Image: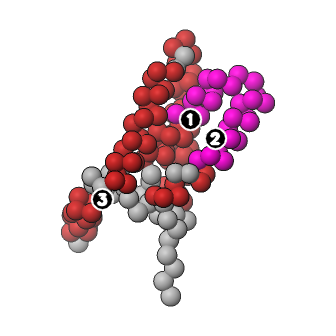
């Protein structure tokens, strides 16, 4: 039964999600931040920046998975099948943005202000178009 459900999900993903414009958009949101980071990263502080990014990645993927599991949000288009989390957000956009903030904002005051601005910016956009709230069925 579980294998049939997995096969059905894979066929649905291949048939209706992969290579659509939202899927390409998610792929771009996944790849572009890493290219930007590789261009801008301070090589002398790379280890501390990467470590900070890894911690951010772990926290964002855990909290995103938790929210999806309890039904707080749903990702209608997925970059990869069998996933509840939004890969571009958890593994690219949020960690890379916070790594760059960590690199460029050296004081706690400016670092906190940068994180607040980044949090406000990524709380609403671009998830508005690619994330939906779960529907309540009566």
| Residue 43 percent coordinates (x, y) | 51, 14
Name the side, left or right, on which 21 lies relative to 38: left
Q: Work out how far the residue at label 2 is from the one at label 1, CA to CA, in angstroms.
A: 7 Å
Indicate the quadrant where residue 118 lies. Answer: top right
Query: Which secondary structure lies at badge 2?
Result: helix
Separation of marks 3 and 1 at Cα, in angstroms: 27 Å
Residue linked to disc 1: 97
- Which of the numbered marks, if any, corresponds to residue 118? 2
Q: CA distance from mark 2 to mark 3?
A: 29 Å
Marks 2 and 3 close (CB-CB < 8 Å): no
Q: Judging from the image, what secondary structure is the residue with disc 1 in?
A: helix
Give me the residue at 63% from left, 27% from top: 102
Report the magenta residues as a range: 96-122
- Check contact, mark 2 vs mark 1: CB within 8 A: yes
Residue ID at (61%, 51%):
123
> For the point 49% across and 75% down, which residue is it?
135
Give the structural element (helix, strand or loop) at label 3.
loop
Residue 17 circle label: 3
């Amino acid at each position: 039964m579980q294998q049939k459900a997995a096969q059905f999900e894979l066929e649905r993903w291949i048939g209706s999600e992969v290579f659509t414009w939202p899927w390409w958009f998610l792929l771009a949101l996944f790849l572009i931040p890493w290219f930007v980071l590789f261009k801008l990263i301070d090589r002398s502080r790379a280890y501390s920046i990467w470590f900070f990014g890894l911690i951010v990645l772990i926290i964002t993927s855990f909290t995103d998975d938790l929210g999806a599991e309890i039904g707080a949000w749903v990702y209608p288009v997925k970059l990869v099948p069998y996933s509840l989390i939004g890969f571009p957000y958890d593994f690219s956009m949020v960690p890379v943005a916070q790594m760059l903030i960590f690199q460029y904002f050296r004081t706690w005051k400016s670092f906190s202000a940068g994180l607040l601005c980044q949090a406000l910016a990524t709380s609403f956009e671009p998830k508005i178009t690619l994330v939906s709230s779960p529907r309540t069925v009566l």
